[in-house]
């Protein structure tokens, strides 16, 4: 996929937008999407949330099919009514769900130096007792379930295929990296859910700047 280099943030240095894989890129293993139905998404379904005091273009770029997100540790929240941490994320709008089995698929890239950040999450409905049932954090090059179990080591500086499967009735989530199941657990149920991805600063081990890149993001479902 052709793309011009673009300097963005890294930890005390610049990184550059690399060529992204195609959706059928080689090197992957099993297909977690087998038996699922693809959900049709439009560009308007991808709603960006970024610091309210700077133009969106200073924290997000969408070029040649690649969405690049970055925030700085001292950035503002995404609006003036919240005290949440800085973020540059996409909320997938119009595809909230409350039943069935749903799956997020995307090809992600986290440049070296990014730490203390969530790069993907399953969010509960607003006002729920628990905000999320799944967050995937990056700490020092390791992808983790929240700040706990390691999902994938050595995540930096490479494109990886991420699949996250949420079985609502069973209240379980499973995470696949490059087609291999790497993690699964039971989760606390909620009334409805939606997917988010990008960068959302967490409460420990944050780098001065946090960045992730995503392409070929797709949702799948089955009853």
Image (cartoon, grey):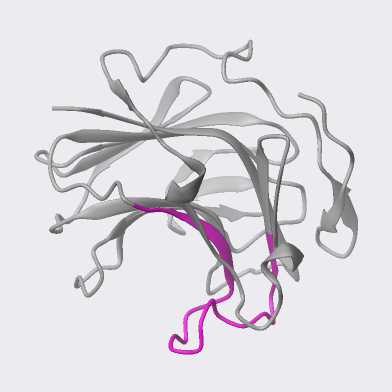
**Residue 8, horizontal then vertical, whole percent:** 83, 56
The answer to if 77 sits in the magenta stretch is: yes
| Figure quadrant of the N terminus | top right
45 displayed left or right of 172? right
Count the marks: 0
Residue 185 vertical position relative to residue 30 in the rendered view, above or below: below
Magenta part of the protein: which range?
Answer: 70-93
Identify whether 128 is placed above or below 195. below
Quadrant the C terminus occupies:
top left
Q: Is residue 91 magenta?
A: yes
- Vertical order, 93 against 73 (above or below): above
Q: Residue at x 55, y 45 (%)?
A: 143
Residue beneath the point at 57% across and 13% down: 24
Left or right, residue 46 beside residue 66:
left
Where does the image place residue 160, in percent across and percent down from the top left?
A: 60, 30
Any part of residue 107 in sight: no
**Location of residue 77 with respect to 144 vertically, above or below:** below
Q: Is residue 18 visible?
A: yes
Query: On the image, which quarter does residue 78 sit in?
Result: bottom right
* Main SS of residues in magenta: loop
- At x 27% / y 20%, what residue is drawn? 36
x, y (%) of residue 22? 64, 20
- In the rendering, at what x and y percent does residue 162 appear? 49, 33
Residue 139 placement: quadrant? bottom right
């Amino acid at each position: 996929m052709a793309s011009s280099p673009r300097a963005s943030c890294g930890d005390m240095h610049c990184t550059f937008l690399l060529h992204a894989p195609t959706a059928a890129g080689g090197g992957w293993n099993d297909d977690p999407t087998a038996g699922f139905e693809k959900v049709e998404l439009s560009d308007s379904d991808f709603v960006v949330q970024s610091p309210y005091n700077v133009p969106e273009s200073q924290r997000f770029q969408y070029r040649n099919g690649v969405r690049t997100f970055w925030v700085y540790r001292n950035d503002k929240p995404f609006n003036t009514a919240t005290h949440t941490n800085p973020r540059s994320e996409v909320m997938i709008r119009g595809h909230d769900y409350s039943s069935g089995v749903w799956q997020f698929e995307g090809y992600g890239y986290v440049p070296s130096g990014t730490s203390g950040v969530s790069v993907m999450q399953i969010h509960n409905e607003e006002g729920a007792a628990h905000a999320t049932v799944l967050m995937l954090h990056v700490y020092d090059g390791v992808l983790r379930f929240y700040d706990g179990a390691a999902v994938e080591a050595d995540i930096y500086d490479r494109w990886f295929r991420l699949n996250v499967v949420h079985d609502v009735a069973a209240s379980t989530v499973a995470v696949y990296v490059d087609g291999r199941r790497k993690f699964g657990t039971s989760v606390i149920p909620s009334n409805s859910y939606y997917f988010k991805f990008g960068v959302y600063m967490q409460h420990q081990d944050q780098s001065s700047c946090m960045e992730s890149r995503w392409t070929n993001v797709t949702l799948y479902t089955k009853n």
